[in-house]
Image (tube, coloured by chain):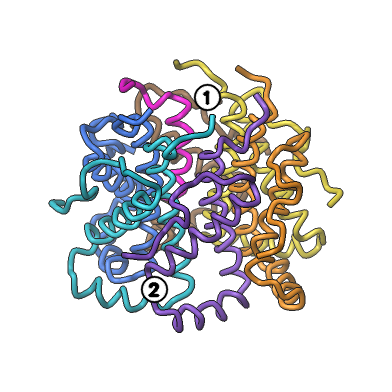
Chain colours: A brown, B blue, C cyan, D purple, E orange, F yellow
Amino acid sequence: MSTSLVPTNSLITATPDEGRQLAIKMARLVIKATQPDEAIRQKLREIYENDAALLIQISQVVASEFATIAAANNYWSTPE
Amino acid sequence: MSTSLVPTNSLITATPDEGRQLAIKMARLVIKATQPDEAIRQKLREIYENDAALLIQISQVVASEFATIAAANNYWSTPE
Amino acid sequence: MSTSLVPTNSLITATPDEGRQLAIKMARLVIKATQPDEAIRQKLREIYENDAALLIQISQVVASEFATIAAANNYWSTPE
Amino acid sequence: MSTSLVPTNSLITATPDEGRQLAIKMARLVIKATQPDEAIRQKLREIYENDAALLIQISQVVASEFATIAAANNYWSTPE
Amino acid sequence: MSTSLVPTNSLITATPDEGRQLAIKMARLVIKATQPDEAIRQKLREIYENDAALLIQISQVVASEFATIAAANNYWSTPE
Amino acid sequence: MSTSLVPTNSLITATPDEGRQLAIKMARLVIKATQPDEAIRQKLREIYENDAALLIQISQVVASEFATIAAANNYWSTPE
């Protein structure tokens, strides 16, 4: 498993928007580690990009990854 | 990935109701980032809007996003 | 999106039982915001009310919403 | 919605085992609130009791409810 | 519901590995409480043991149970 | 259940990337404990590696396991 699973090896991002981008990347890197063949992943991408249920499931995964990233960043703070 | 994934780049909202709206928007923006073609998304929308299972799955995603947003806003406080 | 998504615009309830009711209402209001047509929602209701898998999925969504509401209410406290 | 959704209107239980029982009951009461017809629920019970996927999904719901109950009881404490 | 749902009626374990074992047992005991017939459960076991989707769903349930157990054990500590 | 379920019997890792690797391993070890036959697991692997829905579900499980590991490591700290 030589793929880096966390791009900068850190959960810290400057902003919530970058936190979302990291969540999306981290989810993709797990799929890449599980299915390393780029050609197969491309074929699967064409499937899920056109499937409502799969797109919703992807958004569920991103929500879960983001929850962890947001906690790591103390929710990019403010309220007490 | 040039789409903004968090509208105001902040998880802070004035009220729980606005927090729910943000949760819905954030979930949609992930789907938009994954499937940028508006015409395809419109077609998929017609599918999930009429499918009980998919509507329930969407409400699950929103619940997850909202959990993070609510924590970021310290649950719009009060109890100790 | 003019539907109120949180009835009293607050996550605070007097009791756990009212917290459960709020969780159910919040889940329903997301579905209403996604599918505003009452006639279609009524048709879908007849489907999920008679489908074991969908009823279980609904209870999953309510569990997630309730987790947030319970945290907001400090679990209606007591233990230390 | 006159069904009580939380038996004793409290998340506090004496032990983890009672916490599990409460989690199971709370999940069932949401299904009862959504499908109040006892005869239909009985028919659905025969379905999910014999379906591996549905039994696993039920255990997922119970895990989620229990997470909240356990937090409310401060995990029936000890470690620091 | 006379089945014990938490073997030692405690979420505390000596190590993370024992915490995983407890998570697996707790998930199984919910299924046992829902479907008490050993013969039926055995038949269902043969189904899910050979089904990729069901095995993945089981690992999801275990992840959820473990999250609660890990919190109860303060993650078997160390970092600050 | 003689399989070790947590490789080093600890949730602590040096970095987020190693935390992701641990999350992937822990998810796999639950599947191994449930289906110990290597030949069957290999057959199932060929199924899920080529199935978009299953790959997404796997990434969901990893997200859940990682949430616990990240909390155990205090998110590999920094922000306050």
User: Residue furthest toward the left?
Assistant: C2
To which chain does the residue with label 2 belong? Answer: D
User: Residue furthest toward the right?
Assistant: F2
**Disc 2 residue type (three-letter):** Gln
Q: Report x, y in % for residue E16.
A: 73, 36
Disc 2: CA contacts within 10 A as few (<14), some (14-19) or many (>=20): some
Q: Secondary structure at mark 2?
A: loop
Segment tinted magenta in the rendering: A60-80
Would you identify the image quadrant in which residue E77 lies? top right
Residue positioned 45% across, 84% down in the render: D39
Residue positioned 37% across, 30% down in the render: A18
**Disc 1 residue type (three-letter):** Ser
Is the residue D69 above or below the residue B39 in the image? above
Q: Which mark is residue B8?
A: none
| CB under 8 Å between discs 1 and 2 | no
Q: Which mark is residue D35?
A: 2
Q: Is residue E76 visible from the viewing direction of this image?
A: yes
Specify the principal SS of the magenta part: helix
Residue positioned 32% across, 44% down in the render: C14
Residue A79 on the magenta segment: yes
Question: On the rendered image, what quadrant is the C terminus of chain C found in?
Answer: top right
- Comparing B76 with A61, the one in front is B76
Residue positioned 46% across, 23% down in the render: A12
Query: Label 1: which residue?
Result: A10
Disc 1: CA contacts within 10 A as few (<14), some (14-19) or many (>=20): some
